Image (tube, rainbow, N blue to C red):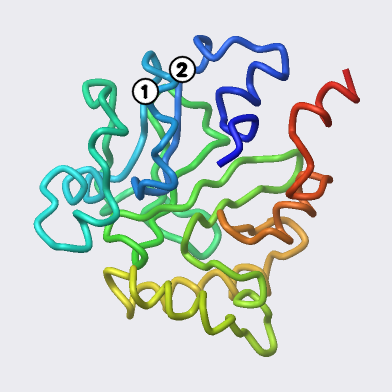
Amino acid sequence: FREEMTAVRQIRALGLDPRDVRHVVMTHLDFDHAGGLDDFPGATVHLLKTERDDAALQIRWLDRARYRPQQWSTQDHWKVYDAAGGERWYEFERVRPLEGVPSDILMIPLVGHTRGHAGVAVRRGEGWLFLAGDAYFFRDEMDLERPRCTPGLRFYQWMMEKDRKSRLRNQERLRELKRAHGSEIEIFSSHDVTEFERLSGRPADFPAEQLLYRHA
């Protein structure tokens, strides 16, 4: 754990006030994704309803292992969305516009890792950034010719998945999206270090604050 890598510390390092954060869009509520929610008590948290329900009820042992209710004490500020319905975005249906959030930020259901897992698309100029969350873990899973995953990460995804068929199908859909629109859409996941370094422009082990101060 490196405190300077938390969202609240990086926001402060940019000279911004974390109290000004009004919206947080979640891919899902696993403990390694939801740990900083309480740093933004005034923000509306957007997520799929199924994810909220599974995290709150914790019926299965896997739910109890992955969700930590002590990490989120601001549930009265949560805004949940049904995965059904919605609009179309490229090859994806059931895309949700988010209440109170600009229309160039979209929530896209990517069920599999959890039953309420989603991706987040953000318009960037003429194209899009598409955070696929934990829909995949290793960059080569998006290889268009020979997709592959390391044995350890393949096992971890199998161990944590809630819907294997949907998870693998959504990986196929992401590859199809990349094949058809790769020049317009930058797809990346939450855990691949190489993707992080490419998008952030710095090594993963470089202290965020030092980089920010260097450019101040």
Image quarter in which the C terminus is found: top right
Q: Is residue 41 above or below residue 159?
A: above
Q: Quadrant of the N terminus?
A: top right
Callout 1 amino acid? Thr
Instruction: Residue 97: name its quadrant.
Output: top left
User: Could you say where residue 147 lies in the image, as x and y percent from the top left?
Assistant: 62, 84
Disc 2 crowd rating (10 Å Cα; few below 14, some 14-19, many 20+) is: some
Chain-order first, disc 2 or disc 1: 2
Q: Which residue is mark 1?
A: 44
Left or right: residue 45 versus residue 211 is: left
| SS type, badge 2 | loop
| Side of 102 relative to 213 (left or right) | left
Which residue matches tag 2? 22
Residue 49 appears at what percent x and percent y? 23, 44
Amino acid type at circle 2 is Arg
Say left or right for 101 vs 148.
left
**For residue 112, which numbered disc appears in the image?**
none
What residue sits 84% from the left and 21% below the top? 213
Q: Quadrant of residue 77?
A: top left
Tags 2 and 1 touching, CB below 8 Å: yes
Measure the C-alpha gap from mark 2 to mark 1: 6 Å
- Name the residue rendered at 10%, 47% in the picture: 57
Residue at the (71%, 12%) spot, across then down: 15
**How many other residues sit within 10 Å of disc 1, few (<14), some (14-19) or many (≥20)?**
many
Badge 1 marks a residue whose secondary structure is strand
Q: Residue 91, relative to residue 108: is it above or below?
A: below
Q: Provide residue 161's location: percent of width, then percent of height.
A: 33, 70
